[in-house]
Image (cartoon, coloured by chain):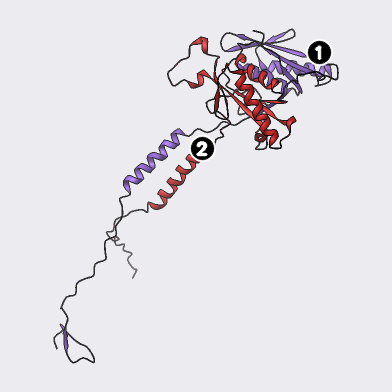
Chain colours: A red, B purple
Amino acid sequence: MARNATFRAGGSGEVSFNVTPMIDVTFLLIIFFILAGKMSSQELARTIKLPRPVRSQALKDGPEQALNRVVVNVVSRAALLGDGESLDPSLRGQASHYEIMGQPINVDDAAELLSRLRRFRDDARDKGQKEEDFTLQVRADYRVDYGQVEPVIAAAMVAKIPKMNIGALLAGNE
Amino acid sequence: MARSTKKIPQDQSVHYVPPRRRRVRPKPKMQPPLTPMIDVTFQLLLFFLVAFQLPQPEGPIPASLPETGPGRHDAPLARPIHIVIRAVGDNAARYEIGNVVTADPTEVYSVLEARKRSAGTSDLPVALKPSGDVRWRFVVEAFNAAVRARFKNIAFAPSSS
């Protein structure tokens, strides 16, 4: 005689799942996002939108370049507007300020800009970096006028900085 | 002998044991409520997810600043290629390379390539002459076209306005 397969309903215990690993993973995610937000370099002003030229020739930046350079950020007035605000047309190409290592410099203060560039050049030389390889990196918002960036280039020439890089987005899917 | 009594060896007396022992109940575990903590944790996670911005991949386009001072030019300079950049309206620009006038940076590259081939060298200097009211991105386009054409000596001239 065949055995009847009978299934008896299981016990009446409640089903619950262990939340401890879920909380662990959630905290790990939070820590990741906190650190990822903080790890962005102080050199690079995040409010700037860099230009993306056609067939961009921008190269991937390496850590060794960061030792012997000064980055000057040219921040657009448009970058500081909130949602829904519009910029006066006469101000559209204007820069709000320059920024070096998070420190703002007034656009009209050429003397301060020159002094900072010289200080960075001298600091790099004192740290044993090659003076002939010291580089100015210009990170300007794509919306500013060339006339707002020109004082930075002029100050770098007066400070006898031999090399210059222009910050741009890497070639993407065009 | 009644069941409620117990005889202990080496002892003549009889001890009374209650008929029903109290069950030893385990002590209740103290656990703080986890639900509000999970709620706050998820809110924090949501905040960071929304506030997080992926940094765009960027890098430098290498250039050289012209040196100032005497004795810089030991060799006679070839005649530079001038690229004049003028603003057209608010958000456009026009590139003038000799007789060629174009708004397309790809054409700027083509013209530079042709000039390089006809000169037989990429040591020709290229001078960018943007007007002061040209948007920076058009200047970078011209500069990028010159770098792409493998010119080594690219300089900026003072703005013409």
Q: Is residue B96 visible?
A: yes
Query: Where is residue A43 drawn, in percent x and y?
Result: 58, 31
The residue to which callout 1 is attached is B79
- Crowd tier of the residue under label 2, counting other residues whose Cα lies within 10 Å: few below 14, some 14–19, many 20 or above: few
Q: Name the residue located 19 percent from the left edge and 75 percent from the top edge.
A: B21
Question: What is the CA distance from the residue labelled 2 to the residue labelled 1?
Answer: 49 Å
> In the rendered view, does B45 fall on the left or right side of A170?
left
Residue at the limit of the structure toward the left, as seen here: B2
The total of numbered circles placed on residues is: 2
Q: Nearer the viewer, mark 2 or mark 1?
A: 2
Which residue is most to the right? B75
Helix, strand or loop at label 1? It is loop
Residue sitting nearer the eye, B116 or B30? B30
| Looking at the image, residue B88 lies above or below residue B6 | above
**Amino acid type, residue under disc 2 in the picture:** Lys
Quadrant location of residue A75?
top right
When asked about the image quadrant of residue B96, the answer is top right
- Front-lying residue, B10 or A71: A71
Image quarter hosting the C terminus of chain A = top right
Label 1: chain letter = B
In the picture, measured across the screen, residue A52 lies left or right of residue B28, that is right
Helix, strand or loop at label 2? It is helix
- Dot 1, how many residues are within 10 Å of its Cα: few (below 14), some (14-19), or many (20+)? few
Image quarter of the N terminus of chain A: bottom left
Q: What numbered label is drawn on residue B38?
A: none
Residues at discs 2 and 1 both on one chain: no
Q: Which residue is mark 2?
A: A38
For residue A123, above or below residue A138: below
Please provide percent x and percent y for residue B111: 74, 15
Q: Is B104 on the left-hand or right-hand side of A103?
A: right
Amino acid type at circle 1 is: Arg
Q: Residue at the spot x=65%, y=28% of the render?
A: A119
